[in-house]
Image (spheres, rainbow, N blue to C red):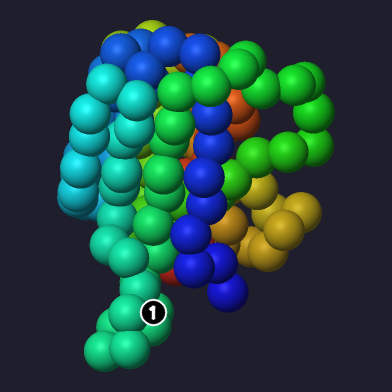
């Protein structure tokens, strides 16, 4: 459903440390960067419409919005665990340790972090034995 998402952060270097770590833990490629921008994932095109892309741009501190977050698909539960550990080690804050969230469905395994700018980021695996 999501083609691409763009967010802003006030410190691109801190964002790069955090997002490089969590995206690597999930197997998502870094596709570009400069002093004002970071890009992860692959842009969709006519040949690959299933792709998704995250753009992080230097900008103002995001406004507080407790319900706003984005969720990244993980290839397995171990990747969710690695996402959370890598994010904490790279300047993120815990917002929900890895574990089952059966109120969504019986196999929903997720972890939540806050990036250095306070944005809420989730990784999820939906598989029963992933």
Q: Nearer the viewer, residue 9 or 117?
A: 9
Q: Residue furthest bottom?
A: 47
Q: Is residue 95 visible?
A: no
Q: Nearer the viewer, residue 115 or 46?
A: 46
User: Would residue 92 be found to the left or right of residue 96 on screen?
Assistant: left
Which residue: 79% across, 37% down? 67
Which residue: 46% across, 51% down? 72
Give the image location of residue 6, x and y in percent. Answer: 52, 45
Which residue: 65% across, 48% down? 101
Q: At numbered mark 1, what does the secondary structure look like: helix, strand or loop?
A: loop
At label 1, counting other C-alpha atoms closer than 10 Å, the crowd grade (few under 14, some 14-19, many 20 or more) is few
Question: Dividing the picture into quarters, in which one does residue 63 lie?
Answer: top right
Give the image location of residue 94, x and y in percent. Answer: 54, 17
User: Would residue 69 be found to the left or right of residue 63 on screen?
Assistant: left
Which residue: 53% across, 22% down? 59
Question: Dividing the picture into quarters, in which one does residue 86 lie?
Answer: top left
Q: Which residue carries the number 1 mark?
A: 50
Q: Is residue 8 visible?
A: yes
Give the image location of residue 100, x and y in percent. Answer: 58, 47
Give the position of the N terminus as an image quadrant: bottom right
Look at the picture and state if 36 lies above or below 129: above
Q: Nearer the viewer, residue 79 or 36?
A: 36
Q: Nearer the viewer, residue 37 or 120?
A: 37
Give the image location of residue 52, x and y in percent. Answer: 40, 64
Question: Dividing the picture into quarters, in which one does residue 107 lie?
Answer: bottom right
Please state the total of marks drawn on the protein image: 1
Give the position of the C terminus as an image quadrant: bottom left
User: Would residue 42 be found to the left or right of residue 102 on screen?
Assistant: left
Look at the picture and state if 17 lies above or below 57: above
């Amino acid at each position: 459903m999501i083609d691409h998402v763009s967010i802003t952060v006030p410190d691109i270097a801190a964002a790069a440390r955090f997002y490089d770590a969590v995206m690597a833990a999930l197997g998502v490629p870094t596709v570009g960067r400069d002093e004002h921008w970071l890009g992860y994932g692959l842009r969709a095109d006519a040949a690959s419409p299933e792709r998704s892309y995250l753009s992080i741009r230097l900008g103002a501190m995001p406004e507080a919005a407790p319900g706003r977050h984005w969720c990244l698909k993980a290839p397995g539960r171990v990747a969710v665990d690695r996402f959370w550990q890598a994010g904490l080690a790279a300047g993120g804050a815990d917002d929900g340790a890895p574990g089952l969230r059966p109120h969504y469905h019986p196999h929903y395994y997720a972890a939540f972090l806050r990036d250095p700018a306070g944005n809420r980021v989730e990784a999820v695996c939906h598989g029963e034995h992933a």
